[in-house]
Protein backbone atom coordinates (compact mmCIF):
# COMPACT_ATOMS: atom_id res chain seq x y z
CA UNK A 1 0.00 0.00 0.00
CA UNK A 2 1.26 3.45 -0.85
CA UNK A 3 1.77 6.16 1.75
CA UNK A 4 -0.61 9.08 2.26
CA UNK A 5 -1.19 11.47 -0.60
CA UNK A 6 0.99 14.51 0.14
CA UNK A 7 -0.36 16.67 -2.70
CA UNK A 8 -3.03 18.37 -0.53
CA UNK A 9 -0.24 19.44 1.84
CA UNK A 10 1.72 20.80 -1.13
CA UNK A 11 -1.29 22.79 -2.34
CA UNK A 12 -2.01 24.23 1.11
CA UNK A 13 1.61 25.28 1.72
CA UNK A 14 1.88 26.78 -1.77
CA UNK A 15 -1.31 28.80 -1.23
CA UNK A 16 -0.08 30.02 2.17
CA UNK A 17 3.30 31.04 0.75
CA UNK A 18 1.80 32.97 -2.14
CA UNK A 19 -0.78 34.66 0.12
CA UNK A 20 1.99 36.09 2.30
CA UNK A 21 2.29 39.86 1.91
CA UNK A 22 5.63 40.79 0.39
CA UNK A 23 7.47 43.97 -0.57
CA UNK A 24 6.63 45.14 -4.10
CA UNK A 25 10.18 44.64 -5.38
CA UNK A 26 9.97 40.93 -4.49
CA UNK A 27 6.33 40.42 -5.52
CA UNK A 28 7.24 40.98 -9.18
CA UNK A 29 10.11 38.49 -9.21
CA UNK A 30 9.10 35.46 -11.32
CA UNK A 31 11.24 33.29 -9.06
CA UNK A 32 8.87 33.86 -6.14
CA UNK A 33 6.39 31.36 -7.57
CA UNK A 34 9.15 28.86 -8.37
CA UNK A 35 10.71 29.16 -4.91
CA UNK A 36 7.28 28.74 -3.35
CA UNK A 37 6.78 25.59 -5.40
CA UNK A 38 10.09 24.15 -4.19
CA UNK A 39 9.31 24.94 -0.56
CA UNK A 40 5.80 23.48 -0.91
CA UNK A 41 7.37 20.41 -2.52
CA UNK A 42 9.61 20.00 0.50
CA UNK A 43 6.58 20.18 2.77
CA UNK A 44 5.11 17.28 0.78
CA UNK A 45 8.39 15.31 1.03
CA UNK A 46 9.19 15.84 -2.66
CA UNK A 47 12.68 16.43 -3.97
CA UNK A 48 16.16 15.84 -2.66
CA UNK A 49 17.11 19.34 -1.55
CA UNK A 50 18.28 19.93 2.00
CA UNK A 51 16.12 22.12 4.25
CA UNK A 52 17.94 25.26 3.19
CA UNK A 53 17.66 24.41 -0.53
CA UNK A 54 21.43 24.21 -0.77
CA UNK A 55 21.81 27.90 0.08
CA UNK A 56 23.03 27.56 3.65
CA UNK A 57 20.99 28.57 6.68
CA UNK A 58 21.71 32.33 6.68
CA UNK A 59 20.94 32.82 2.98
CA UNK A 60 17.83 30.67 3.24
CA UNK A 61 16.55 32.76 6.15
CA UNK A 62 17.20 35.91 4.07
CA UNK A 63 15.20 34.37 1.21
CA UNK A 64 12.29 33.61 3.54
CA UNK A 65 12.41 37.09 5.08
CA UNK A 66 12.32 38.75 1.65
CA UNK A 67 9.89 36.52 -0.24
CA UNK A 68 7.84 34.70 2.40
CA UNK A 69 7.90 36.59 5.69
CA UNK A 70 6.15 34.76 8.53
CA UNK A 71 6.72 31.32 6.93
CA UNK A 72 8.46 28.78 9.12
CA UNK A 73 9.78 25.70 7.40
CA UNK A 74 9.06 22.29 8.88
CA UNK A 75 11.25 20.45 6.36
CA UNK A 76 13.64 17.87 7.73
CA UNK A 77 17.28 18.86 7.59
CA UNK A 78 18.82 16.13 5.51
CA UNK A 79 22.22 16.15 3.94
CA UNK A 80 22.48 15.65 0.23
CA UNK A 81 25.29 13.86 -1.51
CA UNK A 82 28.05 16.21 -2.54
CA UNK A 83 29.01 16.03 -6.19
CA UNK A 84 32.45 17.04 -7.44
CA UNK A 85 30.93 18.94 -10.40
CA UNK A 86 28.89 21.30 -8.17
CA UNK A 87 31.14 24.36 -8.75
CA UNK A 88 31.31 23.68 -12.49
CA UNK A 89 27.51 23.45 -12.68
CA UNK A 90 27.05 26.61 -10.64
CA UNK A 91 29.55 28.49 -12.81
CA UNK A 92 27.88 27.29 -16.03
CA UNK A 93 24.51 28.50 -14.78
CA UNK A 94 25.89 31.84 -13.56
CA UNK A 95 27.67 32.38 -16.88
CA UNK A 96 24.30 32.11 -18.63
CA UNK A 97 22.07 33.95 -16.16
CA UNK A 98 19.57 36.50 -17.38
CA UNK A 99 20.90 39.25 -15.09
CA UNK A 100 17.44 40.60 -14.26
CA UNK A 101 16.92 39.42 -10.67
CA UNK A 102 19.28 38.84 -7.76
CA UNK A 103 17.38 35.62 -7.05
CA UNK A 104 19.07 34.10 -10.12
CA UNK A 105 22.14 33.67 -7.91
CA UNK A 106 20.10 31.56 -5.50
CA UNK A 107 18.62 29.56 -8.36
CA UNK A 108 22.08 28.67 -9.66
CA UNK A 109 23.02 27.25 -6.25
CA UNK A 110 19.70 25.44 -5.84
CA UNK A 111 19.80 23.84 -9.30
CA UNK A 112 23.45 22.81 -8.91
CA UNK A 113 22.59 21.22 -5.55
CA UNK A 114 19.58 19.35 -6.96
CA UNK A 115 21.78 17.85 -9.68
CA UNK A 116 23.03 15.45 -6.98
CA UNK A 117 19.57 13.87 -6.91
CA UNK A 118 18.67 10.62 -8.58
CA UNK A 119 15.33 11.51 -10.19
CA UNK A 120 14.43 13.91 -12.96
CA UNK A 121 15.71 17.39 -12.13
CA UNK A 122 12.21 18.85 -11.75
CA UNK A 123 11.43 16.14 -9.19
CA UNK A 124 14.72 16.61 -7.33
CA UNK A 125 13.96 20.34 -7.08
CA UNK A 126 10.57 19.53 -5.57
CA UNK A 127 8.74 21.26 -8.41
CA UNK A 128 5.23 20.25 -9.43
CA UNK A 129 5.99 19.61 -13.10
CA UNK A 130 8.48 19.71 -15.96
CA UNK A 131 6.82 22.94 -17.07
CA UNK A 132 8.02 24.63 -13.88
CA UNK A 133 11.58 23.50 -14.59
CA UNK A 134 11.31 24.86 -18.14
CA UNK A 135 10.12 28.18 -16.74
CA UNK A 136 12.93 28.21 -14.16
CA UNK A 137 15.54 27.71 -16.87
CA UNK A 138 13.98 30.23 -19.28
CA UNK A 139 13.63 32.93 -16.63
CA UNK A 140 17.00 32.48 -14.96
CA UNK A 141 19.35 30.99 -17.54
CA UNK A 142 17.92 31.82 -20.97
CA UNK A 143 21.24 31.43 -22.74
CA UNK A 144 22.28 28.14 -21.16
CA UNK A 145 23.12 25.26 -23.47
CA UNK A 146 20.06 23.21 -24.44
CA UNK A 147 20.06 19.53 -25.25
CA UNK A 148 19.95 18.75 -28.93
CA UNK A 149 17.09 16.58 -30.15
CA UNK A 150 17.94 12.95 -30.88
CA UNK A 151 18.14 12.10 -34.55
Image (tube, rainbow, N blue to C red):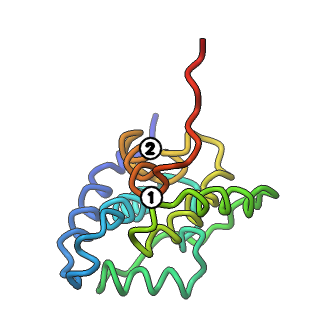
Q: Residue at x 44, y 44 (%)?
A: 3
Residue 140, numbered label: 1
In the foreground, 83 or 70: 83
**Quadrant in the rendering for residue 17:** bottom left
Relative placement, left or right, of 37 versus 114 is left
Callout 2: helix, strand or loop? Answer: loop
Q: Residues within 10 Å of mark 2 (few under 14, many from 20)?
A: few
Find residue 63 and report its horizontal and vertical position in percent: 42, 80
| Residue at 50% across, 64% down | 107
Image mark for residue 86:
none
Give the side of residue 40 with respect to residue 99, left or right.
left
- Which residue lies at the image location 55% right of the left edge and 37% below the top edge? 146
Residue most toward the top?
151
Quarter assignment of residue 70: bottom left
Q: What is the distance, in whole Å, between disc 2 and disc 1 at their CAs?
A: 35 Å
Q: Position of residue 104 (x, y in %)?
A: 47, 67
Q: Nearer the viewer, residue 43 or 95?
A: 95
Picture layout, residue 50 above or below residue 116: below
Residue, x 40% and y 63% (percent of image)? 43
**Above or below, comparing residue 52 to residue 126 in the picture:** below
The quadrant of the picture occupied by the C terminus is top right
Up/down of 59 relative to 90, above or below = below
Return the disc, 2 or 1, that comes first in the chain's sequence. 2
Helix, strand or loop for disc 1 = helix
Q: Which residue is mark 2?
A: 3
Amino acid sequence: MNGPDRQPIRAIVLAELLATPVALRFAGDPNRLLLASMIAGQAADNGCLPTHLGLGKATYLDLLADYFPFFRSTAKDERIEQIPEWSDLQKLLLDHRAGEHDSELWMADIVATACAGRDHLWQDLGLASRDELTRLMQVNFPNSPRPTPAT
